[in-house]
């Protein structure tokens, strides 16, 4: 098995799914993720889950893993937006807009979902769902690379707290994305997601730092008419 300790994000993408540890990232406070200028605008996205694995099964598996099988090879469509932010010093994602649209794509327009951003910290948001369910997400670490002008890679480590009536669940999520600009109106990307147990999980030491779930998505981004 190849080593999972890659020196760069492009190496890490190539080694998927042989990941045994989280990537090296820089701790973030209130700094946002900066994207290249060619990503500015509104995009129509088609996202398709192509691969999912539970490398520590049957001993360890994340709670939502089996339920996610229904999305395998099922394209989902939504919009995302990236915009210039002089305060941040470049192009950033509209996290509230993007999270709301992605949530609707997965759960349906009729599901009651409210995205609550943190006005003081772009790296923290709350997703309030029906039935007293709440997901708090905080970006703790990040890395980015632009090896060529038309290619951009980023990774974020996100600490999540999922609350339901009578239950609370912690985990950490890695999202590593490899964006490739095809032309001014078309971007293709591979998005790799890994779920890690939180140190607060009783099974944390059994996992030994390895991911308990891995997902690979292919994304097609086409510039929306309104985003030109």
Image (tube, rainbow, N blue to C red):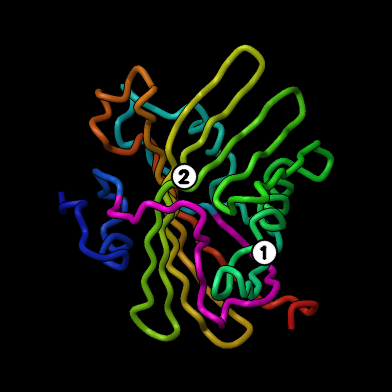
The span from disc 1 to disc 2 (Cα, nearest Å) is 19 Å
Along the line of sight, the residue nearer the viewer: 227 or 46? 227
Q: Is residue 5 left or right of residue 39?
A: left
Question: Can residue 38 be found in the magenta stretch?
Answer: yes
Q: Residues within 10 Å of mark 2 (few under 14, many from 20)?
A: many
In this view, 110 is above or below 87: above
Residue beneath the point at 56% across and 87% down? 183
In this view, 153 is above or below 124: below
Q: Secondary structure at mark 1?
A: strand
Question: Can residue 29 be found in the magenta stretch?
Answer: yes
Q: Is residue 25 left or right of residue 31?
A: left
Residue beneath the point at 48% across and 54% down? 50
Q: Position of residue 170 (x, y in %)?
A: 47, 28
Quadrant in the rendering for residue 76: bottom right
Q: Please count the marks in the image.
A: 2
Q: Residues within 10 Å of mark 1 (few under 14, many from 20)?
A: many
Q: Is residue 177 left or right of residue 202?
A: right
- Quarter containing the C terminus: bottom right
Q: Secondary structure at mark 2?
A: strand
Q: Position of residue 5 (x, y in %)?
A: 19, 53
Q: Position of residue 19 (x, y in %)?
A: 27, 48
Q: Position of residue 95 (x, y in %)?
A: 64, 56
Quadrant in the rendering for residue 122: bottom right
**What residue did someone put label 2 on?**
158
Q: Earlier in the sequence, mark 1 or mark 2?
A: 1
Label disc, if present, on residue 24 of the rendered structure:
none
Label disc, if present, on residue 80 of the rendered structure:
1
Along the line of sight, the residue nearer the viewer: 35 or 10? 35
Q: Which residues are magenta?
A: 23-48
**Foreground tag (1 vs 2):** 2
Residue beneath the point at 67% across and 57% down? 98
């Amino acid at each position: 098995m190849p080593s999972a300790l890659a020196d760069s994000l492009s190496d890490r993408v190539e080694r998927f799914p042989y990941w045994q540890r989280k990537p090296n990232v820089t701790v973030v406070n209130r700094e946002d993720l900066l994207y290249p200028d060619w990503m500015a605008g509104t995009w129509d996205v088609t996202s398709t889950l192509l691969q999912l694995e539970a490398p520590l099964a049957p001993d360890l598996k994340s709670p939502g893993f089996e339920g996610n099988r229904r999305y395998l090879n099922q394209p989902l469509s939504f919009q995302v937006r990236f915009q210039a932010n002089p305060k941040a010093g470049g192009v950033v994602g509209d996290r509230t807009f993007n999270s709301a649209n992605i949530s609707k794509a997965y759960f349906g327009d009729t599901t009651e979902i409210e995205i609550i951003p943190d006005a003081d910290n772009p790296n923290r948001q709350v997703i309030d769902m029906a039935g007293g369910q709440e997901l708090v997400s905080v970006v703790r670490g990040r890395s980015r690379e632009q090896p060529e002008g038309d290619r951009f890679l980023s990774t974020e480590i996100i600490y999540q707290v999922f609350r339901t009536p009578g239950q609370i669940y912690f985990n950490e999520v890695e999202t590593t994305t490899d964006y490739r600009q095809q032309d001014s109106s078309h971007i293709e990307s591979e998005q790799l997601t890994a779920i890690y147990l939180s140190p607060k999980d009783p099974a944390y030491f059994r996992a030994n730092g390895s991911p308990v779930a891995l997902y690979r998505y292919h994304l097609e981004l086409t510039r929306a008419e309104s985003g030109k």
